[in-house]
Amino acid sequence: MSFDLSPTSRPSGLAELRAAYARERAGLDRTVPSGPTPAADPAALGVALGRRHAKLLDDLLVRLFHLLRESGSPGRAAWDSVAIAGVGGYGRGAAALRSDLDVRILARDAQRAGAIADALLYPLWDMGVTVGHQVVTIDDLVEGAREDLPTATSLLDWRHVVGDASLSEALWQRAVSGIFAHSELPRFIERLGKEISQRHERFGGSVYLLEPDVKNGAGGLRDLDVARWAAKARYGVGEFDALVRFGALVAREAEEIRGAAEMLWRLRNLLHAHSGRRTDRLSFDEQELCAGALGYSKTAGPAGPAGDGQKREPPPDEPAVSPEAIERMMSDYYRSARTISRALDVIVSRAMPTLTRRRRRDEDLGRGVRLFDGCITMSDPDLLRTDPAIALRLVSEAVERGVPLLPYARGAIVRAAGDPAFCAALRESPEAAERFRALVATCKETALQSGSVVRELHDLGLLLAMIPEFLPVVGRVHHDVYHVYTVDVHSVAAVDRLAALVRGELAGEFGLPCRLAAEATRPTMLFFATLLHDVGKAIGGKDHSRRGAEMARTILERLGFPPEDVDEACHLILKHLVMYLIATRRDLDDPATISEFCQEVHGREGLRDLYLLTVADLSTTSPTAMTSWKARMLDELYLSADAALRGARADGGPLGMDDQRMARAISGTVGALEDMPAASDEERRAQRDFLARYLASMPERYLLANSPAAIAAHAELARKQQHGGSSVLVALVPSRHPEAAELCVVAPDRPGLLAAITAALAASRLEVHAAQIHSRACDDEGDDGGVIRARSSSSPPAGVRLQAVDLFWVRDRGEGVGGVARAIPKLMTDIQAVLSGQISGAELAKKRRGGALRERPTPKVPTQISIDDRASHHTVIEVLTRDRPGLLFAVSDALYQLGLSISVAKINTEGTRVADVFYVSEADGTKISNGKRMQEVEERLHAVLQGLDGEGSVG
C-alpha cells in the first residue's frame, strides 16, 4: 500500500510547516560561527544547541504527524496504532548540528505501518532532513536485541515522541524483564565492553591522539553513551543527576562529567558547522578554527564555564589564534576526554551486578587493609578521612602481593583524592611520603588495573594529591606532530620505561641502557627526576627545564629527599635536553664537543643518570621518536664522555671509543663482504683490499652508526666509482629503518655536491628523513700491517683526493619506500647534469614544483637559525624549521652560494619539524667571522626559507 504525496495531493499546512522548519533550522546554524571568530555565547554551542535541535525535530515530527493524520490518508486508525520514537542521540534528547534524525516507527503490524513511514519520510526528505528509520514491532526489537548490540542500545535510548504511548511502554517492560533483567546484565555489560575495545582499537586506542575523533575515540561522546547505557540497564536511569540520587555517582563526579561532556559537545557542533556535514575528527586545521570560536586566546582561557569569559585581542602582528591558544584548548579537550574515560570505567564497573553465591575469601592484613576475593580493599571507608595514608598503604599492599585493588576501593580513593582537605592531609603524612617515594621507584610487575604503579597513582588521583604542582601539565599538549602524548602521560610513560630498563626487559633494543640502569646507585632520585623532568611545561612558558628544576626542589624537599639527592635531581631536570641536543646536532668526532658536554654532568655517575633519563624521555615522546640512528648517537656520546671522564683517552683516538664495539663492527663488515657476489677470485681480492683501505679512511662514528651489511655495500659502491671512472654512483643499500629506504651516493667530493644531490632528490619527489655526509681520502693505498683502524677524526687529511660517501634515508612522496628504486636512474642523471653545469640545482628543483602533492594541514613551526663557532675547526649552523619538500636543497645550495664548504651535516626530523645542522668553513678553511659575515649568512638563510614558502613546495 502506497501513499500519494505528490504536490497536488499534499495536505494544506505542509508548506507552512516546511517554511517554519527552515526558519528555525537557519537560526540554529546562525548560532555557530563558521570560522575562528569568537562566538557571542560559547555556552550556546554545546549541549544546549543539541537540545534545541532535538526540540526542533520533536516539534517537526509532532506537527507533521498530526497534520498527516488529519488529512485522512491513510486512515486515522492506522496513525493511532503506531508510536514514533527517537533513538540514538536524538532519543537521548540532544542531536548534534548535522546529525541524522534517527526514529523508529513501532507498530503492531509492521506491514500495514509501511504506509505511515512513506507518509512521514517524503515530506521530511523534501525539507532536507536526513532520516534514519525502521518500521518495527515489539517482538522484532526484543528478539533482535539479544544478538544485535545496536538494537539493544536503541531500547535504552528510546524516547517516545508521538503516537500510541502504550506501545512504547509495553516495549520497555518487555526489555527490562528480558535482556535487561538482573540475571542478564553481566552478559549485556560484557557486550558493551567488547564494543568499547573494538571501537577504541578502530579509532586509535588513546585519549591523547593528535587529531582525535570527538565522538568515537577513547574518551569521546560515544564512551559517555556507553556509560549511560550501562547505568540505565542497571538502575533504570541514565542521566547523571539521577545516578547521584541512586548513589551510583557523587555530586562532584556528576558535575565533572557534565563539564567534560559540554566541552566535547561544543567541539562537535563546531566541526559540523565548519564542514556542513556530520564529521567528528578534530584535525589540525579544525583545532585552529575551534580555538578561535570558543574564545581562547594567547592570554585567556575559554569563554564559558572553564574560563572568565573575557576576550583579549591579540596585537596586530600576531595571528588571531596563537599556537598557545590551540594548546590551551587541546589541553582542556584531553582533560575532558580523560574525565569521560574514567567515568566510563567507574559507571560500567558499578553497573555490573554480582551474581555469584560462593563464599569469598576475606583476610584482615592489619592497619585497615583487607584482602577480599583476591583484591586489596579497606576495612572501613571512613579511614580515608581519619587516616589518609591508607590510600597509599592499599596501593603498596597490592603491589607487594601482586593483586589488584578492589573496584570499590579504587572508587573510594578516586573520590577522596578529589577533596582538597584529604590531599592536604595526605601531604602532611610522613608515612604517605615514604610510601609514595617507594611506589614511584618500584620496578615490580603488577596486577593493578592501570598496569604500572605510577599510572595507577595518576589514575587514582594520588599523584596529583602528593604533587599538586603536576596539575598544570595534566592534559598539557604540544601543538605539533612530534610530541604525541600529553605531558603527564609522557612523564608517566618515561618512568615506566625506566622501570623496564631496570628490569632488563628491553635488552634487545636498549642493551647499553639496560646494563647501566641495573647499576644505578640512587634509583629513587633518578625515578623522581624522570617523573618531574617536564613539570615546568606551563603553556606559553619558556625554558621549562630551568623552571622545572626550581619547582622540583620544593617538591622533593617536601617529600623528604636528602639534600644531595635534591641537588642532583634538580641538576638532571635542568640539563635533561642537553644530551639529546648534542648527540643529534653536534659532531661527536670533535674533541671540543665531548669536552663541552663533560662540563654539563656531575662525573661518571651523573653522566649515567643523564643518559638513562634521556633514553627514557626520548623513547616515550612518540612511538617513532627513538630511531636507531638517535640511539646510536646517544650511545656514542655516552661512551665517549665516559671514557673522557675516566681519563681513558688514547693518542690513537680522541673519542676513546670502545675497542670491542669497533672490532665487532669491522669483523661484521668483513663477513658481510664475503656474502656479496664477486665475478672472480681476483675481484674478491680487490674487494678485500679496498675494504681495508675504505674502513681506515672512514670516521669511527660511521662504523658504529651503520650496519655491517650497509657498510660493505657502501664500500663496494665506492670501489666501483673510484676505479670505474663514473662521476656519480647511486644505489639502494640495506636499511636499518623500515620506514625509509637508504640511498648511498658516491662521487668525487667538491663544493656544491650536497646541493646538487639534494636538488636531484627534490626533483624526484624523495623526502629526506635523515642523512649522513662523509668525505674520505681515496689516494691512500697503504695499509697498517693488516690491522684495520677507522679514522679517529671527522675530517680527512688535507691535500688528498676526496671521495664523498653520502647516505640519505628517503621515502617517495606518493609511494613511500617502494617508489624509491624507480627514481635512481633519473637521480644519477640529474646529479651529473648539475655537476656538469647543464642545469642549475635551482632550475632542476623547480621543474617538479608544479606537480607537488597537496600537504595535509599541520601545526605551524617557527623558523630558528643559530650560528655557533665553539667547535674546534668549523662554524656550526643550526636550522630549525618546518619540514617541506626541497628544504635540504634550499639550505645546502644557499650555503654553497655563500662560498661555504660543508664538512659534516646532521639531518634530524622531529614530526613536521627538522633540525638540520651543518659544520661549515670558508673557502680558505677558516671559521665564519663574527659580525657582518655571520649576519649575512643568517639573513641569507632566512630569506631562502621565506622564499621557499612563498613560491610553494618543491616536490
Image (cartoon, grey):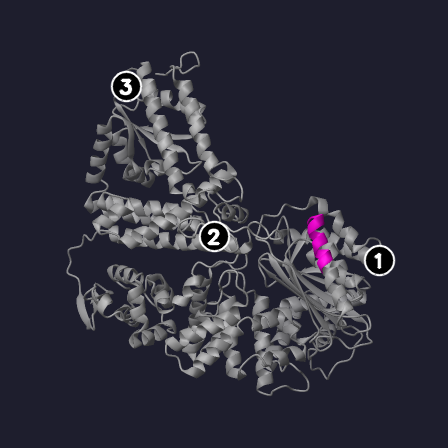
Quick one: 802 or 559, which is closer to the camera?
559
Task: Report crowding for label 3: few under 14, some 14 to 19, many 20 or more residues within 10 A (C-alpha).
Answer: some
Q: Earlier in the sequence, mark 1 or mark 3?
A: 3
Q: Amino acid under label 2?
A: Met
375 sits left or right of 874 in the view: left
Tag 3 secondary structure = helix
Quick one: 776 or 163, which is closer to the camera?
163
| Distance from Cα at disc 1 to Cα at disc 2 | 54 Å
Q: Amino acid under label 1?
A: Ser
Residue 565 seen in the figure: yes
Q: Earlier in the sequence, mark 1 or mark 2?
A: 2
Label 3 belongs to which residue? 78
Tag 2 secondary structure = helix
- What label sits on residue 329 in the rendered view? 2
In the rendered image, which quarter is residue 161 located in? top left
Assess whether residue 715 is covered by the magenta stretch.
Answer: no
Residue 216 seen in the figure: no
Look at discs 1 and 3 and give the one toward the viewer: 3
Q: Is residue 207 above or below residue 17?
A: below
> Total marks drawn?
3
Q: Position of residue 507 (x, y in %)?
A: 48, 72
Q: Position of residue 71 (x, y in %)?
A: 33, 14
| Distance from Cα at disc 1 to Cα at disc 3 | 88 Å
The stretch of residues the image draws in magenta is 942-954
**Residue positioned 62% across, 58% down in the render:** 862
Look at discs 3 and 2 and give the one toward the viewer: 2
The answer to whether the residues at label 3 and label 2 have Cβ atoms under 8 Å apart is no
In the rendered image, which quarter is residue 455 located in? bottom left
- What label sits on residue 836 in the rendered view? 1
| Distance from Cα at disc 3 to Cα at disc 2 | 52 Å
